[in-house]
Amino acid sequence: MKIKYILELVVFICGAIVMIFELVGSRVLGPYFGTSTIVWASLIGVIMGSLSLGYYIGGKLADKDSSFKNLSLIILFSAISISLTIFIKDSLLLVLQINTIIGSILASLFLFFPASFFLGMVSPYAAKLKIENLNTSGTTIGNLYAISTAGSIVGTFLSGFYLIPNFGTNKLLIILSLSLVMVSLLISTTNHIKIKLSLLFFVFITLLVSYGIDSIGAKNGFIDIDTAYNRIWIYDRIDTNTNKPVKIMGINNENHSSMFLDSDDLVSKYAKYYNLASHFNPDFKKTLILGGAGYSYPKYFLLKYPEATIDVVEIDPKVTELARKYFRLTENERLNIYHEDGRIFLNKTKNKYDIIFGDAFSSRNSLPYQLTTKEAVQRKYDILNDNGIVVLNIISAIDGKRGEFLRAEYATYKSIFPQVFIFPVTFLDNGEKPQNIILIALKSEKEQAFTNIDPEINEYLQRLWKKEISLDIPVLTDDFAPVDHYISRCFN
């Protein structure tokens, strides 16, 4: 390779690694803080700030002493910074789970500031080395920054479409570190070569340790998988209510599905309230559920209602694959699975349904806001038959600051449906406590009875919330839906 192209290659690779590192950062923080706009703002803000400081310091240092030796060391320091995150991230993130805003900012500072700072120093330092004529300095600097940005574009697409789903978080961090070590060696002079080779060996051993940890975890029944959409943990534990062994699918460190190892009975109490659908629309045939996860309820539904069909919309095809492998999901002619965003499905479907179940709001840290809005609720109303109903699981309080999300969603459904009821699953007399709440919206205006000959259904009906629900929170719309902030205030 000609010497004049080495700096172009360096800034291209470092530009790509900056964006890959940022996207991997969302997977590092996701299991502990979620993937809300709050977390993304913390991560992007810290990385942009560290890059800016790196640009400034890098330019200052380059003016004082610009050499390939120093640039090589800067890149090496960034490699070490990335490599070390794999050892400290989980312990650090456990300690910082005190508050979503403060915790995500501090975590971003500790984990992503050092490497991003050193990577920010690369472009101005390379520009100083590249400038040969002051008359063309602007062109030289512009070319290098354009190449760096092109690298960032490639890194963005590469990580989102290929690297994260295929390598996972830990392995990808090590790959980034190894790549930077190799770049450092590429531009290295004979000085420090032994030190760099030793560090390369250290990073290589770290890679082996990472593979070893993943292997041990898999053997112990703990599975950690990155997909194009989520970080998923699968593990076994004992259910505290029944003392029976269950298998858990955790998506971004939140329990999104539980399954008894010896039966398809429902583990989650809130999911049993979905049976209220048979009270409000006893003749239902065709149903839809938004959110699949481990497919616990769809499996139960197929057994309990042999005359009905259920369509499942699950955005992540890997989730379905894992459900087939670990959660006894099998083919059934009454089960149809659609792998796409729930809102997109609502917008384009021509199907008509008797019941729409909602199980996509299980997160305490982030949820798909596009399913919460008046426009989405209107589409649900439109695709329901005349006696159709929506049965929606929400995690929120009812009253006070912690109940803002519930009241916002309640107001949104009330703006479309003539009848809306809520059923608190745990705390019937305390509206201040966050809990699972079942919201039921009826397309019919017919007056409803709240008794049933089935003892289980009747028990759920008696948990109807009869107190007034304040309509003090604006209706959610595609233009205004600050649900991440409502949820943040609910649990912090």
Image (cartoon, rainbow, N blue to C red):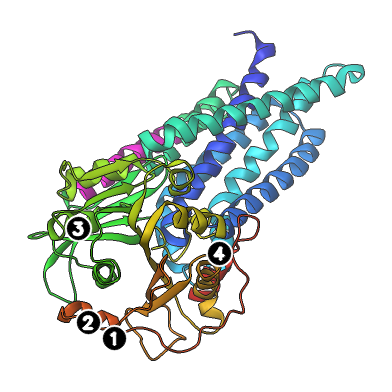
Question: What x and y, as percent, mark residue 90?
Answer: 40, 57
Residue count near mark 4 (Cα–Cα under 10 Å), binned few <14, some 14–19, many ≥20: many
- Looking at marks 4 and 1 on the same chain, the residue that comes earlier in the sequence is marked by 1
In the image as oriented, which residue stretches furthest toward the left? 262
In-front residue for pair 417/57: 417
Residue 380 sits above or below residue 118 on the image: below
Residue count near mark 2 (Cα–Cα under 10 Å), binned few <14, some 14–19, many ≥20: some
Whether tag 2 and tag 3 are in contact, CB under 8 A, the answer is no
Residue picked out by circle 3: 301
Whether tag 1 and tag 2 are in contact, CB under 8 A, the answer is yes
- Looking at marks 3 and 1 on the same chain, the residue that comes earlier in the sequence is marked by 3
Residue picked out by circle 1: 462
Residue at coordinates 49% horizontally, 53% vertically from top-left? 379
Q: Nearer the viewer, mark 2 or mark 4?
A: 2
What amino acid type is highlighted by mark number 2? Asn
Mark 2 secondary-structure assignment: helix
What amino acid type is highlighted by mark number 3? Phe
Q: Is residue 181 visible?
A: yes
Mark 1 secondary-structure assignment: loop
Whether tag 3 and tag 1 are in contact, CB under 8 A, the answer is no
Left or right position of 247 against 81? left
Q: Magenta stretch?
A: 199-218
Picture disc at residue 483 = 4
Q: Quadrant of the N terminus?
A: top right
Left or right position of 56 against 213? right
Residue 121 sits above or below residue 469 on the image: above
Residue picked out by circle 2: 458
What amino acid type is highlighted by mark number 4? Val
- Alpha carbon separation for disc pair 4 and 1: 29 Å
In the image as oriented, which residue stretches furthest toward the top? 2
- Alpha carbon separation for disc pair 2 and 4: 32 Å
Q: Nearer the viewer, mark 4 or mark 1?
A: 1
